């Protein structure tokens, strides 16, 4: 049985993608910050799909120690990993720092996943797929690494866009570093999706409610992610950005800037306490 680890399955796109992977016959390991909700979901997925191999891995991506504990726990299972899906994400209405002292969206959407992915590399099997749920809003992001340990210049959407730009840059950089290994790394925009991403008690939830009837369902939003994880047609593609229809698309030019990619890699490795090289 193949194994898929996916982050952030307790709602939205991740919940549907976890179910799709279970239905496709994968052992699904759900890395979530709220294990009790994840256990409830695991039971529901088993009931819906007949797949009893649905597991919960406690993991708060805002905390590097929690990510390290999750990687250690997964490593203890001695399961080769076939698919890693970096799906979890937050959009914060208000400025806040993670416990480790990083702007929260950068911490969860990029740094936590960077650390998790790096710690998982040795467990990835030949031809493994790494799928990163990014966003088309990466186009409006500016890397601004000087300010990721401060809340200077905070703006919900621009700061979110920076974290999603980091997702795309990390995809391209990691794909290059893994070229020739058989492991693929791709990212995608899921579309604008009616999920829990719009934080409550803020203008973002007001805006989210307004557009909700016109945007994609989580099922539709999960389709491109499932394609990158499962479809044979993308098995040989790596280092690419896909749109919400699962077609390869052009990313923002700034996401392809190798100097910025290297700066992001070096910074992320350093603050995560990892070597700069693989
Ligand atoms: N919805 C959209 O329009 C849209 C558009 C482009 C890209 N995306 C991306 O799609 C991905 C999935 O988002 P979604 O729309 O499905 O949103 P969602 O319904 O809010 O789901 C986000 C998931 O991430 C988890 N999460 C948040 N913070 C976490 C943390 N610190 N540690 C571990 N897990 C954490 C959430 O857990 P809890 O349930 O515990 O909060 C939840 O399971 C994200 O990467 C998002 O940036 C979404």
Image (tube, rainbow, N blue to C red):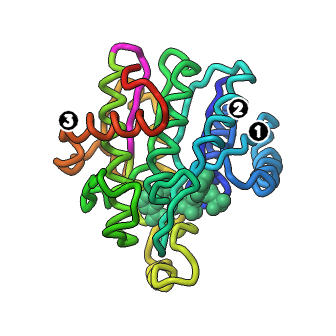
Q: Residue 258, which numbered label?
A: 3
> What residue is at 68 percent from the left and 32 percent from the top?
25
Q: Magenta residues?
A: 180-187
Secondary structure, mark 2, is strand
How would you rate the neighbour count of disc 1 (Cα within 10 Å): few for under 14, some for 14-19, many for 20 or more? some
Q: Residue 83, how many percent across, how many down?
A: 55, 31
Q: Which of the 4 image quadrants contains residue 22?
A: top right
Left or right of residue 77, residue 138 in this image: left
Q: Please name the residue that numbered disc 1 is placed on.
A: 55
Q: Quadrant of ligand 1?
A: bottom right
Q: Residue 27, which numbered label?
A: 2
Quarter containing the C terminus: top left
> What residue is at 49 percent from the left and 78 percent from the top?
212
Q: State which mark lies toward you, 2 or 3.
A: 3
The CA distance from mark 3 to mark 1 is: 37 Å
Left or right of residue 72, residue 269 in this image: left
Which of the marked residues, 2 or 3, is nearer the chain's N terminus? 2
């Amino acid at each position: 049985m193949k194994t898929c680890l996916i982050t952030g399955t307790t709602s939205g796109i991740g919940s549907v993608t976890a179910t799709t992977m279970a239905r496709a016959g994968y052992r699904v390991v759900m890395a979530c910050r709220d294990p009790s909700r994840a256990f409830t979901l695991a039971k529901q997925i088993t009931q819906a799909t007949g797949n009893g191999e649905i597991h919960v891995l406690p993991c708060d991506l805002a905390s590097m120690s929690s990510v390290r504990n999750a990687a250690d726990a997964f490593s203890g299972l001695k399961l080769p990993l076939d698919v890693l899906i970096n799906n979890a994400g937050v959009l914060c209405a208000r400025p806040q720092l993670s416990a480790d002292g990083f702007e929260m969206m950068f911490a969860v959407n990029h740094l936590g996943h960077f650390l998790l992915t790096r710690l998982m590399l040795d467990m990835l099997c030949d031809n493994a797929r790494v799928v990163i749920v990014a966003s088309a809003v990466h186009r409006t992001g500016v890397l601004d690494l000087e300010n990721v340990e401060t809340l200077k210049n905070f703006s919900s959407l621009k700061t979110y866009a920076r974290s999603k730009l980091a997702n795309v840059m990390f995809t391209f950089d990691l794909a290059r570093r893994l070229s020739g290994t058989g492991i693929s790394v791709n990212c995608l925009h899921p579309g604008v999706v009616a999920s829990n991403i719009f934080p409550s008690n803020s203008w973002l939830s007001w805006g989210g409610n307004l557009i909700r009837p016109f945007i994609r369902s989580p099922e539709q939003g999960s389709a491109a992610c499932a394609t990158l994880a499962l479809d044979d047609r993308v098995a040989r593609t790596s280092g690419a950005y896909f749109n919400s229809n699962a077609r390869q698309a052009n990313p923002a030019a700034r996401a392809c800037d190798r100097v910025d990619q290297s700066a992001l890699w070096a910074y992320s490795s350093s603050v995560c306490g990892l070597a700069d090289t693989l």
